[in-house]
Image: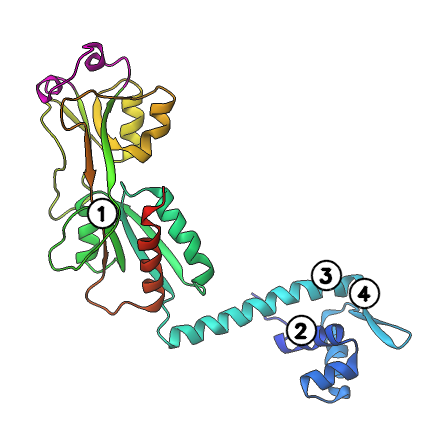
């Protein structure tokens, strides 16, 4: 890439001439001589090969090209200032990036609400978001790749902050044979029907969760896949209420009338990496996740 011919300081000088109404006023604002300001602008026009200013009476005004370039230069200087601010914040301990790992069952609405609130406070900090299932979150905490993690598991050696629970409900397609029984169901009724379960994404200590009493079980990788399969008439499952509310409303899914165990509530917890200090950006994001954990 070719090096820029015009420096940030030259663009700042041009902005001062326009913003302060002339060369003399710009010189005073910049604590420079008027001849220095005039030379800087003249040199810019020579380097760019484009006239930026023209004199009308006693006042320097922008040409059409100058107006376009000045507008773009304001963005350039703003980004340069933000870059320097980020470097200062990093020197003071502000993280350039936060790695957030969440269980796939965590409601997207709650997460999005927290991230929207974090955005204006982030000071350029990036968020690396990763979804895992069950012990996959634990693996990311244990291998140190997660700064923050949301999990429904109790993970030994970590002190969690409890968040709101996620509610699961047993569902099947309205035309599924279980619904055709037209009575309250027991777990014995479920045993001879296909159950759809979500694969634990962990590698070290994968876990089973919930009722797994069906003789035939198919395992899928995501909640979305499970919901679509069941809505097509294939099997039954316990799924998060927030994920399937719209499918129940439109009639693609119907809650199973179980005598007991149709609904279950899974508490969720927020964990932080215990092997390194929590930085300021990570702390702000953690507080916002806690604050917005009740968002529906």
* Location of residue 24 in the rendering, given as x and y in whole percent from the top left corner: 78, 84
> Mark 3 sits on what residue?
68
Q: Judging from the image, what secondary structure is the residue with disc 2 in?
A: helix
Question: Residue 105: which quarter of the image?
Answer: top left
The residue closer to the viewer here, 55 or 51, is 55
Confirm or deny contact between disc 3 and disc 4 (CB under 8 A): no
Q: CA distance from mark 1 to mark 2?
A: 52 Å
> Mark 2 sits on what residue?
11
Confirm or deny contact between disc 2 and disc 3 (CB under 8 A): no
Residue 168 lies, with reference to residue 87, above or below; the image says: above
The residue closer to the viewer here, 150 or 69, is 150
Main secondary structure of the magenta stretch: loop
The residue closer to the viewer here, 190 or 99, is 190
Q: Earlier in the sequence, mark 3 or mark 1?
A: 3
Q: CA distance from mark 3 to mark 4?
A: 9 Å
Residue 195 lies, with reference to residue 207, above or below; the image says: above
Q: Is residue 275 magenta?
A: no
């Amino acid at each position: 890439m070719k090096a820029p011919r015009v420096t940030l300081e030259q663009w700042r000088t041009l902005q001062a001439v326009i913003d302060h109404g002339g060369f003399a006023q710009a010189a005073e604002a910049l604590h420079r001589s008027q001849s220095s300001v005039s030379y800087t602008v003249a040199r810019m026009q020579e380097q760019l090969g484009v006239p930026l200013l023209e004199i009308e009476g006693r006042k320097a005004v922008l040409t059409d090209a100058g107006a376009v370039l000045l507008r773009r230069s304001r963005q350039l200087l703003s980004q340069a200032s933000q870059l320097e601010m980020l470097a200062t914040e990093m020197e003071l301990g502000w993280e350039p990036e936060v790695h957030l790992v969440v269980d796939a069952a965590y409601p997207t609405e709650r997460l999005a609400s927290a991230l929207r609130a974090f955005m204006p406070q982030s000071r350029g900090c990036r968020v690396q978001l990763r979804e895992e299932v069950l012990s996959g979150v634990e693996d990311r905490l244990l291998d140190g790749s997660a700064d923050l993690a949301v999990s429904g598991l109790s993970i030994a050696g970590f002190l969690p902050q409890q968040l709101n629970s996620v509610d699961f409900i047993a569902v099947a397609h309205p035309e599924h044979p279980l619904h055709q029984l037209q009575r309250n169901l027991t777990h014995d009724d479920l045993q001879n029907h296909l159950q759809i379960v979500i694969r634990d994404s962990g590698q070290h200590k994968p876990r089973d969760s919930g009722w797994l009493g069906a003789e035939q079980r198919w395992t899928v990788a995501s909640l979305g896949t499970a919901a679509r399969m069941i809505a097509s008439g294939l099997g039954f499952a316990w799924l998060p209420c927030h994920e399937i509310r719209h499918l129940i409303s439109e009639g693609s899914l119907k809650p199973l009338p179980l005598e007991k165990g149709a609904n279950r509530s899974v508490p969720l917890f927020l964990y932080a990496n215990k092997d390194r200090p929590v930085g300021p950006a990570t702390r702000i994001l953690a507080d916002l996740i806690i604050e917005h954990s009740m968002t529906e």
